[in-house]
Amino acid sequence: MPTVDRNLPGLEDLEAARARIAAMLLPTPLLPSRSQEAALWLKPENLQRTGSFKFRGAYHKLSRLTPEERARGVVAYSSGNHGQAVACAAALFSCPATIVMPQDAVQEKVDGVLRYGARIVSCEGGSDERRRIAEELAAKEGLAIVPPYDDLDIVLGQASCGLEIARERGEIRQVLVPVGGGGLLSGVALAVRALLPEVRVVGVEPQGADDLHRSFESGAHVRLEHVDTLADGLRTQSVGEVNYAILRAVVDEVVTVSEEEILEGARTLLWTEKLLVEPSGAVAFAAFQSGRVPRDVETAAVLSGGNISAPVLRSLLER
Amino acid sequence: MPTVDRNLPGLEDLEAARARIAAMLLPTPLLPSRSQEAALWLKPENLQRTGSFKFRGAYHKLSRLTPEERARGVVAYSSGNHGQAVACAAALFSCPATIVMPQDAVQEKVDGVLRYGARIVSCEGGSDERRRIAEELAAKEGLAIVPPYDDLDIVLGQASCGLEIARERGEIRQVLVPVGGGGLLSGVALAVRALLPEVRVVGVEPQGADDLHRSFESGAHVRLEHVDTLADGLRTQSVGEVNYAILRAVVDEVVTVSEEEILEGARTLLWTEKLLVEPSGAVAFAAFQSGRVPRDVETAAVLSGGNISAPVLRSLLER
């Protein structure tokens, strides 16, 4: 178990962040898994506002801006879930929002952003290009950037998910969390380790986007040139700098799952657990189901989101 | 609001039934609806053991048999959800179970029964024929019959669902419940009215199986010759005798929903609420969504089950 650095955010910081956002969160109570014949609890963030955990960090970040900053507006770059979350949080603050999205974004995620009245700027290229355009817009229009993960206020918002898990079920000894940019894992790890120091915290990545796994193996902060996975929310080439420092300090292990294991996980969640979970949201459950982590300790798996596209859902049903 | 008959089961009876089954129930916490822009709470019985509320009544019924009766075994007739529930409850009591099912039963429901080690007897014809065969088996093999709905012990088991709703959210003023044989509606109505006397309790039927609606209109216990609805769990020709007496006393109104409203309800539950709910389980939500009941009072809708077949789910996605 890693030692916790004294410079990391402490329980008071996590509690303060949670207090700023608690009234806006929807309840996502731990649900006992019916499919695993093992002590597994599901943390259903697909039931969170906007259909993913991303609302926690986005709303917290906006709550930390000044009223003047919010009046000028915010800009975010996102393949989808973060965009919906920022659009929704901005609407709750009556603050203008612009979301830079890839041209091939899932239609359901585009609709999700439009529903909250945000402006969409479409862009070719990868996440680096989206970030560049957002920074350009921020400079030109005086907007505040709401980054998707590499930001301490975002991490502190996501930590509320970990506080809830640890408070609701103190018997848990292992927590499994999907890893994209590492914001959720950073926040959850800080929170559960603050309340339950004996808990094993495990990050889960798709094999085709295993940058953090490689970083943990090599000891160096790895950046992948190419990522390839159905889990569109986890296609980051590297976790954030802020997050990497936290993750090294409070995460025990990073495991990977295959595309087939992710699909099988999403199928089981749908047919047996009766929950609609997107592939990115199913990786932690998939790691447990396929035995990539110990199955004999009481475990919580974060189902990080449920914004699946119709074609992907149809492909799940074809098997 | 109907007056409550003193001969009806009282709160003590309902509490005693709940105490017998509580340890075996899974939590199905009320979830706030994200789709309706109104104060609507979802009671997700699709997350209950065996994927429907039916486990509550089945387990309670078995708990009321003598050990000798349970040792000889039980028999049930069902198109699916009640069969799975009896099979699961019997397995928990280590008691042999036989389920009489229609030959065209949904494969997922057949698999659900087999998973718990029960014997299946397939049968042609409708629910009357299944009942006759179950009674024959009971007589020949000394089995105890576990009826699907028309039985006070079944009703008392289902009532636990209503106690949970009323205890969790005392502000609720309207409860919407699907109606097939009337066991769930009877139990939930007794329970919520016992704890929250001002609550309006509304039964919801498909237009193609509207026997209780017609009964309430005409004042006579109506039995339909033909029923026609996608909601396979609600294809009963008539509510039970025991139930009808209770329903007349404690239910305020019965409304109906069209097949298109049911499908639209199931779609919204899947895409926006991220919950897999079968058509029968979606009718109460559909009544709220389509404005068949007042939308300006705090409401709970029971999602009674989630055991949908793959073809029906695929048909939901085609629109």
Image: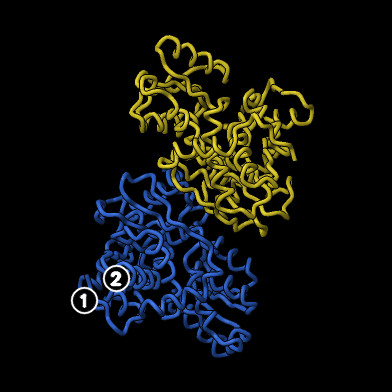
Chain colours: A blue, B yellow
Whether residue A102 is visible to the viewer of this picture, yes or no, is no
Residue B24 appears at what percent x and percent y?
Answer: 41, 40
Answer few, some or many: residues within 10 Å of disc 1's Cα (few below 14, many 20 plus, some between 14 and 19): few
Which chain hosts label 2? Answer: A
Marks 1/2 same chain: yes
In the picture, the disc for residue A212 is 2
Q: Is residue A177 above or below residue A274?
A: below
Residue sitting farthest toward the top = B140
Residue sitting farthest toward the left = A218
Q: Specify whether A272 is left or right of B240.
A: left
Q: Is residue B313 above or below residue B61?
A: below
In terms of depth relative to the viewer, which is nearer, B200 or B33? B200
Residue B194 appears at what percent x and percent y?
Answer: 62, 42
Secondary element at image label 2: helix
Q: Quadrant of residue A254?
A: bottom left
In terms of depth relative to the viewer, which is nearer, A273 or B222? B222
Residue identifier under label 1: A219
Q: Amino acid at mark 2?
A: Leu
Q: Quadrant of residue A158?
A: bottom left
Which chain hosts label 1? Answer: A
Answer few, some or many: residues within 10 Å of disc 2's Cα (few below 14, many 20 plus, some between 14 and 19): many
Residue sitting farthest toward the right = B218
In the picture, the disc for residue A104 is none
Indicate which disc, 1 or 2, sits on the residue closer to the N terminus. Answer: 2
Residue B118 appears at what percent x and percent y?
Answer: 38, 26
Determine the CA span between mark 1 and mark 2.
10 Å
Q: Amino acid at mark 1?
A: Gly
Residue A303 appears at what percent x and percent y?
Answer: 42, 58
Whether residue B8 is visible to the viewer of this picture, yes or no, is yes
